[in-house]
Image: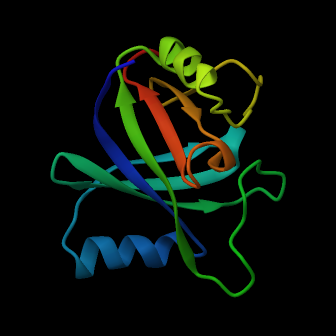
Amino acid sequence: MTVTGLDHVGILVADLEEAKRFLGDAMGLEVAREAELEQLGLIAAFFACGPAMIEVFQIVDADSPLRPLEDGATARIDHVAVQVDDLRATRQELDAHGVRTIEVGDGEEPTSAGGNLNYWTDAESSAGVIYQLIEKGAG
């Protein structure tokens, strides 16, 4: 397994438009891309921030497999995304260390989004943090 770099930090927000205004207008960051991921029940915007990005996303489907915000919360840091050179080999190596992945869509198969393949670790098995593992251009 080779981690090749930080891809983005994902922040779950209650109001995507408000988050976009803050990052765009107040912070001066530019939107790199926007996405709707139906299998995860969310809409997202990615802001370029040096060599990495900041993702802000809002859950829009009550059946989303993602953990919603706590009552009254307006945002939380949800996950850290890293790029890997071989996603399936990375998963096998993490499995050997007792790290579980969150099943999305077809379960054991990686999720394809934005032309990339993805797995997310189960925070309970990865030191309390969800890590999104991304193989760029593979999906």
Q: Give how far across and how far down residue 98 sits, in percent.
A: 65, 30
Q: Tell me if residue 82 comes above or below residue 130 in the rendering.
A: above
Q: Tell me if residue 23 comes above or below residue 50 in the rendering.
A: below
Q: Give how far across and how far down residue 131 sits, in percent.
A: 51, 43
Quarter containing the N terminus:
top left
Q: Give how far across and how far down residue 134 sits, in percent.
A: 44, 29
Q: Quadrant of residue 76?
A: bottom right
User: For the point 18% across and 72% down, which residue is it?
Assistant: 28
User: Farthest residue toward the left?
Assistant: 50
User: For the point 57% across and 46% down, which residue is it?
Assistant: 36
Q: How many marks?
A: 0
Q: Is residue 58 left or right of residue 138?
A: right
User: For the point 66% across and 33% down, which residue is it?
Assistant: 101
Q: Tell me if residue 29 comes above or below residue 14 in the rendering.
A: above
Q: Tell me if residue 76 comes above or below residue 34 in the rendering.
A: below
Q: Give how far across and how far down residue 56 sits, in percent.
A: 46, 61
Q: Is residue 99 left or right of residue 57?
A: right
User: For the point 34% across and 79% down, which residue is it?
Assistant: 22
User: Farthest residue toward the front?
Assistant: 97
